[in-house]
């Protein structure tokens, strides 16, 4: 860590993600001389390669806009590079390196053969028209297409990139490559190679993980109050499945504040989350304006100020601080599972773990998204499509398996489970073993 801090001093998010993993694996690493001999730690923290490129495009006013584009191909020990694209104004190399690094271990947990990658741009979708989104996606793909391929590197969505953006990018890819390489992107539309359940998969998978965790501790979700942050793809899937399982969503949030939902979230509200997302306004207040009396908006507050049993961060990294963790616990919260990648700050995780709040990290909880991307790749490679029921059954099995791996490597002497350690070790063991077997490259 000292060497890494010196070399990449500015990359705060990446250093945070690396430190958590290295802390978790230290003990098991020292029991494997073959890892040390192959310098696995020094190698696994450096990406295989990074592409950075200029993305120039023309906005609706006719002005030229210039953004930065990236693809971090982090590790390909167990399969082709796989991971999402994030479009957000704060995107930089540190953010994408942290996400790519997390993706290595997450993908290893899914049981599917996928390496780790991440990409994106500092393009800000907020306030952009549909035509601007299309022109940006096309300009982005003009550079990215040479870096990717169905057996090389398969991007998908992340914050700011959903089905619409994947469609525009795929269209341009196809035009440039002159091949119908369906498997080059995942999260495609259901009529042209997309997995029927990919939009729901991250949120559904998160709730399946929560179900497994609660069952392990002799509890269930029926009647429990669930606070969600965000109103994007992950929060939408999580809200849908919470309702189906008999839980009650009491809050959603946005960058502008929180919407309290005293009677829970209705199907109409869940549908409206999609409208809010595609409007590119990025305001959760829109929910309160649309459903007055049922959704109560408070500016500047987070979802963590609303009393709940279960907290599900579903928005952005470091969105839940140690103070938020304390407020949650004081208000009765006893379980926190990350739908977002690295949603909790290190102090929040420590607080949860030291105060009897069940905590599970994003790389286990939200892995259903990329797992279903992996299933989409399988369907594309076989030139067929599976029904929603088939994909859902596979997703159930995968989330159960991820939970089992966390328990296997995370069980402590006192019988409790450290899900952070469990997830990190389980993912690391698979990747490190493959790296040793493939020699020094
Ligand atoms: O963080 C993630 O796992 C994703 N954004 C999904 C990646 C994917 O390839 O489906």
Image (spheres, rainbow, N blue to C red):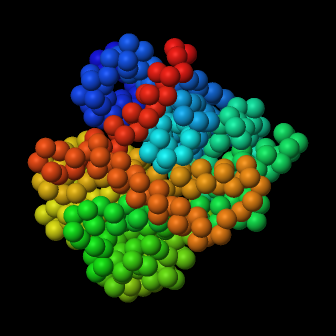
Horizontal placement of 336 versus 85: left or right? Answer: left
Residue 236 percent coordinates (x, y)? 49, 68
Q: In this view, does 262 lie above or below 335?
A: below
- Name the outermost residue toward the right: 178
Q: Looking at this view, is 241 or 388 the one in front? A: 388
Q: In this view, does 36 lie above or below 183?
A: above
Q: In this view, does 387 lie above or below 89?
A: below
Quarter in which the N terminus is drawn: top left
Quarter in which the C terminus is drawn: top right
User: Residue 277 appears in which quarter of the rendering?
Assistant: bottom right
Query: Is any part of residue 405 visible from this angle?
Result: yes
Report the residue at 65% width, 61% height from top. Answer: 195
User: Residue 190 appears in which quarter of the rendering?
Assistant: bottom right
User: Residue 9 appears in which quarter of the rendering?
Assistant: top left
Report the residue at 32% width, 17% height from top. Answer: 33
Query: Is any part of residue 296 visible from this angle?
Result: no
Residue 318 percent coordinates (x, y)? 34, 46
Q: Looking at this view, is 271 or 27 the one in front? A: 27
Report the residue at 71% width, 44% height from top. Answer: 184
Residue 274 percent coordinates (x, y)? 57, 70
Horizontal placement of 5 versus 95: left or right? Answer: left
Q: Looking at this view, is 319 or 144 the one in front? A: 144
Count all numbered tags in the image, as a single digit.
0
Report the residue at 76% width, 65% height from top. Answer: 191
């Amino acid at each position: 860590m000292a060497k890494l801090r010196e070399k990449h001093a500015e990359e705060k998010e990446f250093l945070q993600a690396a430190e958590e993993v290295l802390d978790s694996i230290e003990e098991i690493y020292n029991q494997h001389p073959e890892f040390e001999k192959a310098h696995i730690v020094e190698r696994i923290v450096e990406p295989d390669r990074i592409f950075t490129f200029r993305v120039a495009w023309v906005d609706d006013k006719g002005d030229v806009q210039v953004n930065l584009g990236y693809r971090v191909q982090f590790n390909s020990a167990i399969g082709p590079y796989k991971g999402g694209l994030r479009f957000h104004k704060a995107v930089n190399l540190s953010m994408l390196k942290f996400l790519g690094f997390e993706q290595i271990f997450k993908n290893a947990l899914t049981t599917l053969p996928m390496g780790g990658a991440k990409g994106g741009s500092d393009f800000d979708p907020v306030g952009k028209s549909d035509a601007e989104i299309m022109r940006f996606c096309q300009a982005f793909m003009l550079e990215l297409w040479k870096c990717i391929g169905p057996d090389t590197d398969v991007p998908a969505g992340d914050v700011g990139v959903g089905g619409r953006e994947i469609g525009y990018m795929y269209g341009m890819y196809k035009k440039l490559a002159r091949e119908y390489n369906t498997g080059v992107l995942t999260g495609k539309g259901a009529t042209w190679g997309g997995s029927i359940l990919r939009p729901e998969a991250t949120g559904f998978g998160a709730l399946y993980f929560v179900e497994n965790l609660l069952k392990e501790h002799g509890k269930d979700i029926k009647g429990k109050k669930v606070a969600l942050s965000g109103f994007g793809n992950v929060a939408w899937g999580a809200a849908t499945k919470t309702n189906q399982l008999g839980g009650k969503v009491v809050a959603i949030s946005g960058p502008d504040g929180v919407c309290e939902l005293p009677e829970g979230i209705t199907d109409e509200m869940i549908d409206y989350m999609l409208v809010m997302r595609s409007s590119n306004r990025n305001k959760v207040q829109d929910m309160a304006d649309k459903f007055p009396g049922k959704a109560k908006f408070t500016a500047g507050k987070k979802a963590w100020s609303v009393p709940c049993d279960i907290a599900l961060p579903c928005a952005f990294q470091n969105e839940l601080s140690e103070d938020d963790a304390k407020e949650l616990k004081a208000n009765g919260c006893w379980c926190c599972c990350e739908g977002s990648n690295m949603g909790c700050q290190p102090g929040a995780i420590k607080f949860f773990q030291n105060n009897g709040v069940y905590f599970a990290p994003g790389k286990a909880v939200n892995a259903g998204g990329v797992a279903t991307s992996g299933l989409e790749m399988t369907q594309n490679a076989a030139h067929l499509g599976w029904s929603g029921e088939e994909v859902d059954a596979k997703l159930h099995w995968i989330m159960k398996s991820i939970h089992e791996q966390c328990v296997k490597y995370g069980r402590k002497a006192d019988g409790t489970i450290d899900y952070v350690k469990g997830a990190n070790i389980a993912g690391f063991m698979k990747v490190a073993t493959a790296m040793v077997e493939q020699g020094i490259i």
